[in-house]
Amino acid sequence: MKVWAKTEEFSEGKFLVVRRDGSIPHWPHFVLGARDPATPDALRAYADICQRLGYEPEYVASLRELADDFNSYRLLHGEGDPEAPPHRVDDPNVIDAMRGNHQSTIIVTRDKRNVPK
């Protein structure tokens, strides 16, 4: 399976990314999850590039710390399967918001399925 944003059926992506002010970024983005076994290495590689580009050392260190946090989470809660097909029912209002309808109203809830295994 391709990354969802690169498919016709799920071109809006897998996750709705919302800033703290309630706005949705218009540029391409990609969400990394702690259960994805590739995430810690991806974060560390990003930290390495940030360091080479001269980003603040505190920012770079926090990326590496986050990679460790994600690794610990995965060890405690189990690995996910980033290549798995869709397994939840889409909320049409969320999909509408992801497609750019700024009139959409969504209700946000906690993921009850993400309990420790």
Image: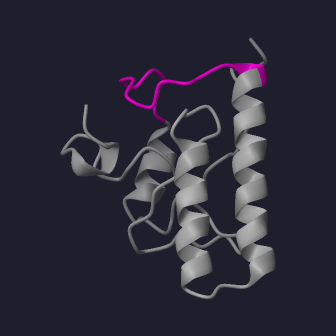
Residue shown at the point (21%, 44%) measured from the top left? 7
Say left or right for 9 vs 91: left
Q: Image quadrant of residue 44?
A: bottom right
- Picture coordinates of residue 110, whole percent (x, y): 75, 35
Where is residue 87 drawn, in percent x and y?
45, 20
Q: The magenta stretch spans which residues?
A: 76-90
Residue that lies at the very extreme toward the left in this rendered image: 8
Is residue 101 or residue 18 the one in the foreground?
Answer: 18
Residue 34: within the magenta? no
The residue lying at 50 percent from left, 73 percent from top is 25
**Residue lying furthest bottom:** 54
**Is residue 32 visible in this depiction of the protein?**
no
The front one of 69 and 108 is 69
Q: Is residue 92 visible?
A: yes
Quadrant in which the N terminus is drawn? top left
- Residue for point 72% across, 58% down: 64
Q: Is residue 9 above or below residue 80?
A: below
Residue 95 image position (x, y, % from top left): 43, 48
Q: Position of residue 69 (x, y in %)?
A: 78, 44
**56 relative to 49, above or below:** below
Residue 80 lies within the magenta run: yes
Tell me how the rendering is colored: one colour
Direction from residue 47 to residue 98 in the image, left or right: left
